[in-house]
Image: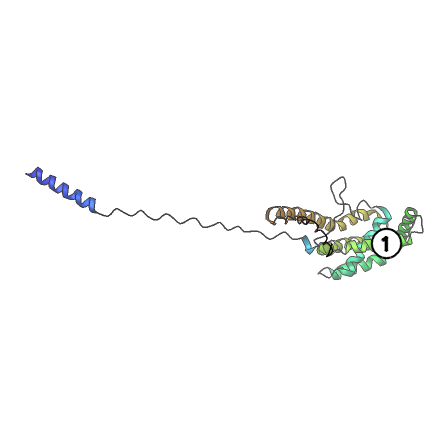
Amino acid sequence: MNVSRKIIVAGLLASVAACAPKPVAPPPPPPPAPVAIVIPPRPLPPGYASLTQILPGRGIDGRFVTANSNISGDRAFWQLKIGLNVAAIGCRGLEEATLVSAYNNIIKAHAKVIKSTEKSVITQLGKENGNNGIAARDRLSTQLFNYFAQPPAQRAFCTRANEIAQLVSSTPTAQVVAQSPAHLATLDQPFIDFYEAYARYQLDAAAWDAKYAPPPAIMTAPPPPIATPAQPAASPSGV
């Protein structure tokens, strides 16, 4: 009897279980959010330089060759004096007062050397150009003024020019020409640094363009016009 009752109870439980609603499967997880692609800004030229800046060539040592590279003797002092002149005229930072004062002292203390080295440069340029050298001196002076006045390098140039002006101002006249090549190279370094920074910018900009810039549009030539057959001329009436 007990066995029968157990069988009946088990059967009832099985019937109830069969009638119970089947569990609903949970909804699938939402798809992952799309990964945002952040495009960095395109690199900009250093020192707010032009996008079309032309760099000088490099020498066999890999350094940029400028108007002040490998200059020695009287010409080194003459070019150094032009660079310091540009700085005294154009530099308006914290170093302005000491720079102008040192440059004015150079003009007074080394007046004879300034005159003799300029005469030497004129003679040298005259031999190179087959003339009296005056016009060549003027052209080179203009080239150097423009070179030393390049805006992207001015901040570093003015700081360096102030340091050099103090040294030249306090140097005995008999030693200024011998020390000029080293001073000129130091004064030229801000421009070398700018050219190196611009060369790195060109590489970075090219890499950015290769990765992020849209491909150029493909230009296709328009299809040639379809030639239509010539229509026969109408016959005159009455023929």
- Residue 102: image quadrant is bottom right
Specify whether residue 81 is in view: no
Q: The N terminus appears in which quarter of the rendering?
A: top left
- The reply, left or right, for residue 11 in relation to residue 226 is left
Residue at the farthest top position: 3
Is 114 drawn above or below residue 8 in the view shown? Answer: below
Specify whether residue 8 is in view: yes
Amino acid marked by disc 1: Arg
Q: Position of residue 72 (x, y in %)?
A: 83, 46
For mark 1, does the 10 Å Cα neighbourhood hold few (<14), some (14 to 19), or many (20 or more) residues?
Answer: few
Residue drawn 77% across the image and 57% down it: 87
Q: Pick whichever, 144 or 231, lies toward us.
A: 231
- The reply, left or right, for residue 186 in relation to residue 25 is right
Q: Which residue is mark 1?
A: 139
Residue drawn 77% across the image and 54% down it: 148
In the structure shown, which secondary structural element does the residue marked by tag 1 occupy?
helix
Is 14 drawn above or below residue 95 in the view shown? Answer: above
The coloring applied to the image is rainbow
Q: Position of residue 32 (x, y in %)?
A: 43, 48
Q: Position of residue 181 (x, y in %)?
A: 81, 47
Q: Pick whichever, 7 or 143, lies toward us.
A: 7
Q: Pick whichever, 133 or 11, lies toward us.
A: 11
Residue drawn 12% across the image and 42% down it: 9
* Total numbered badges shown on the rendered structure: 1
Q: Pick whichever, 20 or 183, lies toward us.
A: 20
Q: The C terminus appears in which quarter of the rendering?
A: bottom right
- The reply, left or right, for residue 78 in relation to residue 56 is right
Residue at the farthest left position: 1
Q: Position of residue 58 (x, y in %)?
A: 75, 43
